[in-house]
Amino acid sequence: MCALVVNGVFIGKAEDIGGGLSSAIDKLPVDHRLWLWPQGLGSDEQGDPRFHGGPERALHHYPVEHYRYWRRHYRHLDWKAPSFGENLSTCGLTEDQVCIGDIFRWGQAFIQVSQPRSPCYRLSRRWGIPSLPEEVQESGRCGWFYRVLRPGYVSREDAVELIQRSYPGLTVAHAIRSFFHYPLEHAGLQQLQQCEALSSRWRDTAARRLSSGLVEDWNARLFGLPLEGMRA
């Protein structure tokens, strides 16, 4: 795989979005270099640390290619990075082309794909489209997260280059299909559970489904609850 040129790097501050909710989805571009560390990119913040950020979701990557799709479906909106709250925007790499566990060099840092994004109701609050999180999930245009294996300085000027692929049979797109589209399909859940590079949250959920034969309730994540996301 050739090195990718970064189109944009973005960070945000947690802000009150009403109803006792806080979000940092409305991010701004950064042109100078930032320190990427295991908790995230520079001073980037999260609205609800229980479900966003942390070592296994330190950096969110969203392909710029997906914005053509969203512009076709919602022509009245000016879709462009970072409309989905991404930290990293590139062209030339989508969910079908990247695998769970892939290790990339970006600037001085080494980053590893840890899980797809689980879209949540903050997207609908950001854009006024109640169905948007579910549409993102069903379309498979979720983007993905990284954990940071080696901290370092990164910038928009630095290329992103694949240096190791350990799970070629588990693309991010395949993980999305197994987790969201066929959530009780045994072989897919087993593959997720057995992938050591997948985040512990996703592996634990796959194990629970295999054991119980039940899918957890997604309504709180997709549509929100009155107190969901309230800052402590």
Image (cartoon, rainbow, N blue to C red):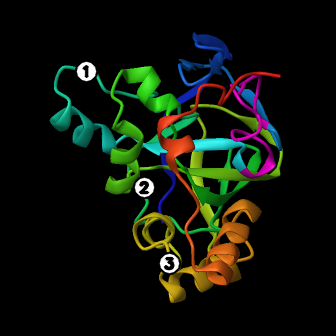
Which is nearer the eye, 111 or 197?
Answer: 197
Which is nearer the eye, 199 or 125?
Answer: 125
- Chain-order first, disc 1 or disc 3: 1
Secondary element at tag 2: loop
Mark 3–mark 2 Cα distance, whole angstroms, equals 28 Å
Where residue 211 appears, as percent x and y from the top left, is 68, 82
Main SS of the magenta part reads: loop
69 on left or right of 57: left
- Residue depicted at x 83% and y 22%: 232
Where residue 72 appears, as percent x and y from the top left, is 16, 36
The numbered dot on residue 77 is: 1
Question: Which residue is under mark 2?
Answer: 93
Is there any visible trace of residue 15 in the rendered image? Answer: yes
Place residue 24 in its image quadrant: top right
Secondary element at tag 1: loop
- Chain-order first, disc 2 or disc 1: 1
Task: Based on the picture, tell me whether residue 124 belongs to the magenta stretch.
Answer: no
Indicate whether 194 appears above or below 87: below
